[in-house]
Image (cartoon, grey):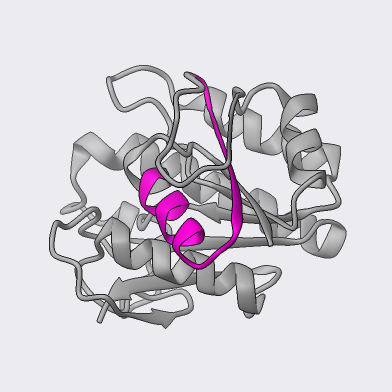
Amino acid sequence: MNITVIGGTGNTGTAVVAEAARRGHTVTSASRSGRHAEGAATDVIVDLADTAAVVELVNSADATIVTVSPDRTGGPVQPTVDAFKALITARPTGRLVIVGGAGSLLDADGNRLVDSPDFPAEVRPEALAFSEVLEAFRAAGDALAWTLVSPAPTYPSEQSTGAYVVGKDNPVGAKLSPADLAIALIDEVERDAHRGERFAVASA
């Protein structure tokens, strides 16, 4: 398969590119820097906010995995939300698999993790942003081929187990490593098991 990874030079993206290449897929790594991601056949420069360029990448691949997070240095997170909403409005025809946050997952009482008073304040803006992104994709329905993956609350963890477990809207484990998330993401690309929905992943 031809797989594009947007955010291919980041912590998650690097693991995803390597896992896809290990399985024999042809990988395009897209990032704002354009620097080489190990395992990528092609490296391109792209910003998620450049909707036309992103749509072109998505439509030219068998599947596109987006591993782009909002600003984590205290800057605004709204540009990332706006970029995803613009992409949804553009209605690309290719498959999209988005790595979202854990904050939109539900606790045993059906409340979002991000709404808990114990939720870490430093990651709340990112969690709220991805919660909004998830709802935007849900509102789009089957107008585009999408899947959103929520990692375990402790992500990234260093220890890889080489295996993972999945759930739907509730956490299925406490920790997840980039390597284990990469396995889950490439499995999803190959199997197309969760089209049009969100699912949760944790290291087994």
The reply, left or right, for residue 9 in relation to residue 152 is: right
The reply, left or right, for residue 59 in relation to residue 20 is: right
Q: Which residues are magenta?
A: 14-32
Tell me which residue sits at (48%, 53%) in the image. 99
Residue 39: image location, x then y, percent: 45, 47
**Rendered view: 126 above or below 76:** below
**Rendered view: 162 above or below 112:** below
Tell me which residue sits at (55%, 23%) in the image. 79
User: Which quadrant of the structure image shows residue 22?
Assistant: bottom left
Tell me which residue sits at (30%, 73%) in the image. 202
Residue 147 within the segment the image draws in magenta: no
Residue 21 within the segment the image draws in magenta: yes
Tell me which residue sits at (64%, 30%) in the image. 83
User: Which quadrant of the structure image shows residue 189?
Assistant: bottom right
Residue 191: image location, x then y, percent: 63, 79
Judge whether residue 105 can be spotted in this image.
no
Residue 60: image location, x then y, percent: 80, 45
